[in-house]
Image: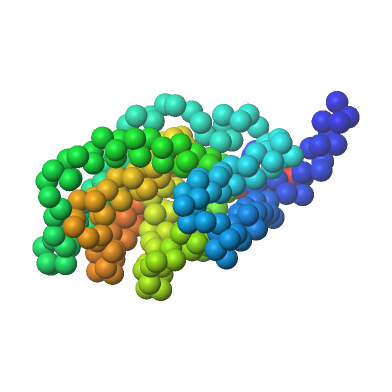
Amino acid sequence: MAEADAGRASSAGMTRAGGRARWTEVAAYLGLTVVVVNLLGIPMITGLIPADLLNAVVPVLQYTPFIVALIMFRVLRPGRFRDVFAVRRAGVLRWGSIGVGIIAAVAAAELIFALATGTAQLAPVGQIVGLLPILVLVFAMQSVFAIGEEFGWRGWLVDRAAHWGFWRLSLIFVPVWMIWHLPVLGTLADQTVGEKVIYFLGMGAWAPLLFALRLRSGSVWPPVLAHGAINSVRVYLLQSVPLRPVDHLAAELLGWVLLIAVAAWLMRPSVRATIPELAPADPMRAA
């Protein structure tokens, strides 16, 4: 009993009563995650890892947000794992389908825009259809890889900091997510500076949507599936369906606008008012 009291006292400076984190806890989590992934990613950034091994290393790095969150979970003991990481299954089928559907629809809109403006041409039908079985496998694989990020970002982080507000949390998180992705530069060696900038800026549009799916569903699984779709369904529609990848700025801008608009609609004020996690923290309950 004394040990339990000591444990609670040791975390009182970082955590609010009622499972709501102080800014110090959130800063510690984000900072540790960024430092760990970039230290582990130095061999990727500097080219020390052979190119044919990069695809095996990236999924390992994707689990750093979850690993750091697990360590903090063990130290702070804020509640049950299933609650803190939002692994509940209710609504997963509905909101998972909505999330994957949004990813596919936005990518399709970008593709149609590129075709209409003459900046892209469709690949042969046989090639498009022939890749569908592979797409299913890649989607399943990428969803497994996405667990590492989503259990950290949309599981632990949302549970601890949702009371900051949807847009505030999203805006604070975007630059952190960009920095966290720096090791990915090792896999983008053959891309131009402009293409790399577009890749990183795109995260500013993805983050609000993934947060919205987590908050609307109350579960981390819809963001997991949507994240898996970003790295599979979206890639298929924009890189395998056209003869050449659709990666010019105009199409990307269209996608960003659509993603932010969808996130804003999903998290419109009337909806945000019904989500208990978004309620501001009560300073009278601070630990």
Quadrant into which the C terminus falls:
top right
Residue 41 falls in image quadrant: bottom right
Q: Where residue 194 sits in the image (x, y, percent)?
A: 37, 73
| Nearer to me, 199 or 267 | 199
- Give me the residue at 43% from left, 63% from top: 188
Direction from residue 198 to residue 37 in the image, left or right: right
Q: Is residue 135 visible?
A: yes
Residue drawn at (58%, 61%), measured in percent from left and top?
48
Residue at the extreme bottom of the image, as rendered: 193
Residue 104, percent from left and from top = 26, 46
Question: Residue visible at 29% across and 45% down?
Answer: 233
On the image, the x and y values in percent for residue 247 come to: 28, 64
Tell me if 209 is positioned left or right of 240 in this view: right
Q: Nearer the viewer, residue 145 or 6?
A: 145
* Quarter in which the N terminus is drawn: top right
> Is residue 160 something one can see in this rendering?
no
In the image as oriented, which residue stretches furthest toward the right?
2
Q: Nearer the viewer, residue 8 or 70?
A: 70
